[in-house]
Image (cartoon, rainbow, N blue to C red):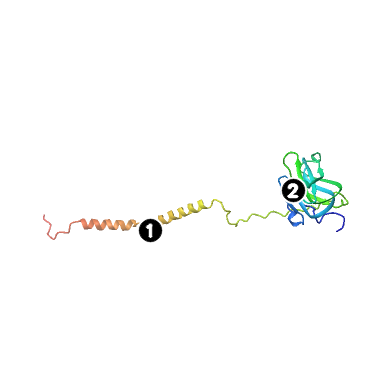
Amino acid sequence: MPRTSLVAILALASLLTLPSLSAAAASCGTENLYDLGEPREISAIVAQADANDTYKVMGSADGSPASFKLIVELANVVSTGHGLRTRATQVPPTTVRYLRIGDANGDAFFSLSELQAFCKAPTPFPPGMKIVEAPPAAAADSQAPPKPGSDTGRWALLLTAVALALAWLAYKTITRPSGGAAADATKEADKAAEPPPSDKPPTT
């Protein structure tokens, strides 16, 4: 491969894009370990991390815990501003397969967004970063089914109870006798209670 930079191996290596690279990363506490796949010579490091902390970049040929040696300690750069800040440094050429960044020292709130390692420092150094816009967030679907755990069971029971009450009221209204029929029945009862007419002529 051309002796220029390790862009194809470990560049723009944010923790979100590492799975698509040939280098594998394993997070362990406040440290991140990167496997370059085979021993490679590096001579420049670029990292973007929290400004008010220091970070150690260490390398190893075989990955055993005792074999990691300090390559460079990235300084606290809070004097340039807060938030994520880029550090770029050139180091004496060293051959490693595993890169580890961590052992941070600062306010106990550490963050790392990018790590680059180069065989040879490119020109210009540090290289420019390509800035792209994030895709817009998808709008919430108003027709989407309710999420599990949402309070829909209580409303279903309430609506069922209301429907049953309305059905019972309608039934009672239909089966109740009308006012006219009740009056007719009363009249018939009164007639039945009257004595039958006598066929004797009235006396004077």
Q: Which residue is mark 1?
A: 174
Residue 58: x %, y % from top left: 79, 46
Q: Which residue is nearer to you in this view: 139 or 128?
A: 128
Q: Amino acid at mark 1?
A: Ile
- Number of marks in the image? 2
Left/right placement of residue 113 relative to residue 157 reads right
Q: Residue at x 80, y 45 (%)?
A: 69
Residue at the farthest bottom position? 199
**Residue 32 disc label:** 2
Q: Amino acid at mark 2?
A: Asn
Q: Quadrant of the C terminus?
A: bottom left
Q: Quadrant of the N terminus?
A: bottom right
Secondary structure, mark 1, is helix
**Residue 156 disc label:** none
Residue at the farthest left position? 203
Secondary structure, mark 2, is strand
